[in-house]
Image (spheres, rainbow, N blue to C red):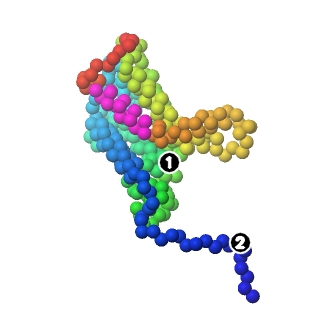
Amino acid sequence: MTTTDDTSVASPPRAAISARNLRIDNWRKGPILTVVGITAWVAYATFRVFYQGDYWVADYHYLTPFYSPCVSEGCVPESAHFGRFLPDHPLLPYAALSLPFLLAFRLTCYYYRKAYYRSFWLSPPACAVPDGHPRYTGETRFPLIGQNLHRYFFYLAAVISLINTYDAILAFHSPDGFGFGLGNLVLVANVVLLWCYTLGCHSCRHVMGGRLKHFSKHPIRYRLWTMSSALNTRHMMWAWITLASLALTDAYVMAVAAGWITDLRFVG
């Protein structure tokens, strides 16, 4: 006697089409712009990190975030707020203590994963577009299994954001006393944007409200979770804005330090 499964559902086979996808919009624009934007930023940041010059404005205590904290023996003593203990070498960034962790934080970020998976790896390049690779193993093997370390890189990134905040505050106290200029506004704006990106991180959102069964019993954590969630909804925007703010802040400090422009002073 043959039995049939009443729960099974018969469906027609998938339609056979010759086109690789049915997208009629310009879906290639996003991946191309992402490749151009990230490549340009990485090229500029790499140049500045290993340039090892024009990173500190002694008159106003401006320190570019690309060199913070400056812990190399080659750092100007006044710019080394936490001491100089790393050897001075052309291939060792002055901020070698923080840059690897910031890079790891960005590389493992949920948004940046999507960005470079779709653009550089074409995996997949867009929704409803075939993957550029014949096989998909997910993030279960080396090196992509390292993406699971993102939550730990978040803690380190938060500490570095605190250091950047300290640098911005310290810049209001120049050798001549209190004062501020356009450079101070640039440094503060960059710090605020960095905090928006860092506190909107998915890991931060989980730290604030994860593993809670009743929000009503934890009103403070619930409030922090809602604030982080509000930032998280625009995580992509903060990710790109902070790349721009970091480059612009560094370029401004470099221009003032090199004597190309004069800082516009409001007080002092």
Q: Is 127 situated above or below 134?
A: above
Residue in view at x 45 percent, y 47 percent: 112
Quadrant occupied by the C terminus: top left
Q: Earlier in the sequence, mark 1 or mark 2?
A: 2
Residue 249 inside the magenta-drawn segment: yes
The amino acid type of the residue labelled 2 equals: Thr
Quarter-wise, where is residue 80 in the image?
top left
Residue 68 inside the magenta-drawn segment: no
Disc number placed over residue 7 in the picture, else none: 2
Residue in view at x 24 percent, y 24 percent: 260
Q: Nearer the viewer, residue 177 or 112?
A: 112
Quarter-wise, where is residue 55 in the image?
top left
Q: How many residues crowd mark 2 within 10 Å: few (<14), some (14–19), many (20+)?
A: few
Q: Is 106 situated above or below 55?
A: below
Q: Nearer the viewer, residue 36 or 202?
A: 36
Percent across and percent down for residue 152 are: 52, 45
Give yes or no for contact between labels 1 and 2 (Cβ–Cβ under 8 Å). no
Tag 1, which secondary structure?
Answer: helix
Task: Read off the residue under disc 1.
Answer: 110
Q: Which segment did they paint magenta?
A: 240-255
The amino acid type of the residue labelled 1 equals: Tyr
Residue in view at x 39 percent, y 56 percent: 121
Percent across and percent down for residue 193 are: 46, 32
Percent across and percent down for residue 220 are: 67, 33
